[in-house]
């Protein structure tokens, strides 16, 4: 009798454990897409070496929860990150492959900062991307040729960077682009445009007074 009762208790405990694990897996499955995007954005934040205005100060985990939809510069739709808008912030850093995890992004706007290095190939593989604005930064090196195969892209702004002479022919042949700037000579006098672009020094002005950082450091 005792042996039978002990077996039933063990069976009951196993059923409770299985139920708890099942609920945990359901919760993880439900939240993982947004959490994976949040983790990717946090890795991007780690690459930012200077944030003079504290724009990314609320990009953090709170009580074990990651909610990128509440972060500055991030917009979501149906609990998916679709817009990253961090323009005019004088951020200094570089971009990495973590952007490939943000597969629902429709718009990346990093205009008027001091990002440098090359553009990750993973950005060129974002099939939902419609707007990419990287103007007025310090990007250099080869530009991902995969953008030539992106049928969603409508706006590509690369003006005032260092790689403009090294763009692959495929980029120039993208016929669907409604707006495509790669030559600063096509723009209104660049000297009249407020810029956070620098030569490796963080901008120390306020956002409203953020004129050219490289001019401030001369």
Image (cartoon, rainbow, N blue to C red):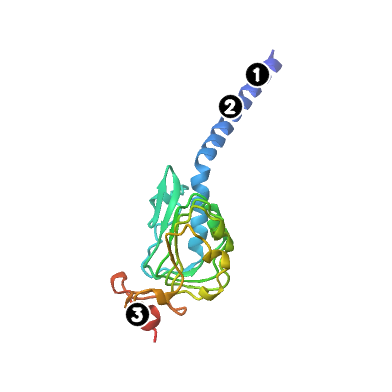
For the residues labelled 1 and 3, the Cα–Cα distance comes to 80 Å
Closer to the N terminus: mark 2 or mark 1?
1
Which residue is disc 1 drawn over?
Answer: 8
The answer to whether residue 135 is left or right of residue 97 is: left
The answer to whether residue 182 is left or right of residue 19 is: left
- The total of numbered circles placed on residues is 3
Q: Residue furthest bottom?
A: 218
Which residue is disc 3 drawn over?
Answer: 191
x then y, percent, for residue 32: 53, 44
Instruction: Identify the residue at horizontal 31%, vertical 70% (top origin).
Output: 207
Please tell me which residue lies in front, 21 or 162.
Answer: 162
Which residue is disc 2 drawn over?
Answer: 16
x then y, percent, for residue 147: 54, 60
For the residues labelled 2 and 1, the Cα–Cα distance comes to 12 Å
Which numbered disc, 1 or 3, marks the residue closer to the eye?
3
Alpha-carbon neighbours of circle 3 within 10 Å: few (<14), some, or many (≥20)? Answer: few
Instruction: Identify the residue at horizontal 58%, vertical 63% (top origin).
Output: 145
Mark 3: which secondary structure? helix
Q: Quadrant of residue 191?
A: bottom left
Mark 2: which secondary structure? helix
Q: Is residue 172 above or below residue 26?
A: below
Please say if the residues under marks 2 and 3 sit with CB atoms less than 8 Å apart: no
Closer to the N terminus: mark 1 or mark 3?
1
Q: Is residue 218 above or below residue 4?
A: below
x then y, percent, for residue 2: 68, 16
């Amino acid at each position: 009798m005792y042996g039978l009762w002990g077996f039933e208790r063990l069976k009951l405990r196993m059923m409770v454990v299985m139920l708890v694990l099942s609920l945990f897996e359901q919760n993880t499955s439900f939240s993982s897409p947004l959490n994976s995007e949040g983790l990717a954005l946090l890795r991007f934040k780690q690459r930012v070496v200077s944030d003079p205005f504290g724009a990314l100060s609320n990009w953090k985990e709170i009580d074990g929860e990651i909610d990128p939809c509440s972060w500055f510069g991030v917009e979501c739709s149906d609990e998916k990150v679709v817009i990253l808008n961090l323009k005019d912030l004088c951020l200094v850093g570089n971009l990495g492959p973590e952007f490939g995890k943000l597969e629902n992004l429709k718009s990346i706007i990093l205009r008027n900062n001091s990002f440098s290095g090359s553009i990750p190939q993973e950005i060129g593989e974002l099939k939902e991307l419609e707007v990419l604005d990287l103007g007025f930064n310090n990007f250099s090196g080869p530009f991902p040729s995969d953008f030539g195969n992106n049928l969603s892209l409508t706006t590509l702004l690369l003006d005032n960077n260092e790689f403009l002479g090294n763009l692959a022919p495929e980029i120039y042949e993208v016929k669907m682009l409604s707006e495509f700037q790669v030559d600063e000579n096509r723009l209104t006098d660049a000297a009249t445009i407020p810029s956070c672009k620098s030569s490796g020094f963080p901008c120390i002005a306020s956002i409203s007074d953020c004129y050219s950082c490289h001019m401030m450091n001369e």
